[in-house]
Amino acid sequence: DTEVTQTPKHLVMGMTNKKSLKCEQHMGHRAMYWYKQKAKKPPELMFVYSYEKLSINESVPSRFSPECPNSSLLNLHLHALQPEDSALYLCASSLLAGVAYNEQFFGPGTRLTVL
Amino acid sequence: SQQGEEDPQALSIQEGENATMNCSYKTSINNLQWYRQNSGRGLVHLILIRSNEREKHSGRLRVTLDTSKKSSSLLITASRAADTASYFCATDGYQAGTALIFGKGTTLSVSS
């Protein structure tokens, strides 16, 4: 299985809602990532987990809360988002973090719209 | 933060033609990678070239790397309509290779 899955594919939420994005991989990768991508822009790194521990937080607002319950699963909890948070949220994984020769495998993304 | 800058930003060609995209970056790297993204979808890894390599091939793809100029190019030969996508270069210059930094991307349109 060489696939990263993300659910849901689309999510519409109000600014007072709480929702979660889910990402799963079964490739035995020990590094997992969340990226945010606005239209016609490159992906921007949000968080990196290495061996289920948060290793990088790119100064992301606290309304985004990541969680890595186990080595295969990565969640992104959303609370009190703003309309400008509407974007494509991409999850990725790689064999290891902090290694020079490291391709990343991306999921299809969750298209988030905040009303 | 962004590391790579692709050139051109947009490229339109006919099927069968070759497409060349360039990427420049700022800091030293261990490797440079190219990814493809179809509209609104996830990214697909195309090829990785290490800093001690100058050229690499994979099918219809040819990547070059010039570390002295801090630049790379991606050549797609005999383009097909299915190659229509955005192409991003990405470097591992972030925190000793912990994560990738993506360039702004080139949008390629191949018409039949």
Image (cartoon, rainbow, N blue to C red):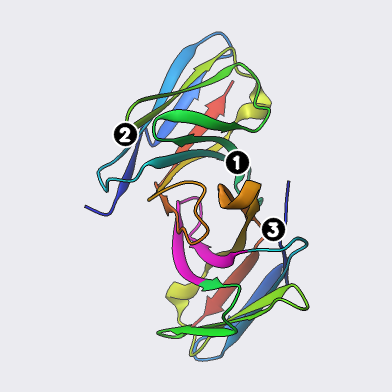
> Which secondary structure type mostly characterizes the magenta part of the structure?
strand
Start-end of magenta stretch = B30-48
Q: Are marks 2 and 3 on the same chain?
A: no
What type is the residue that disc 2 sits on?
Answer: Ser
Chain ID at mark 3: B
Q: Residue at x 54, y 29 (%)?
A: A113
Q: x, y percentage for residue A23?
A: 36, 35
Q: Residues within 10 Å of mark 3 (few under 14, many from 20)?
A: many
In the rendered image, the vertical position of residue A68 relative to residue B70, given as above or below = above
Q: Residue at x 34, y 46 (%)?
A: A29
Which residue position is annotated with label 2? Answer: A71
What type is the residue that disc 3 sits on?
Answer: Lys
Which residue position is annotated with label 3? Answer: B104
Q: x, y percentage for residue B99?
A: 56, 48
Q: Residue at x 47, y 46 (%)?
A: A97
Which residue position is annotated with label 1? Answer: A45
In the rendered image, the vertical position of residue B97 relative to residue B106, given as above or below = above
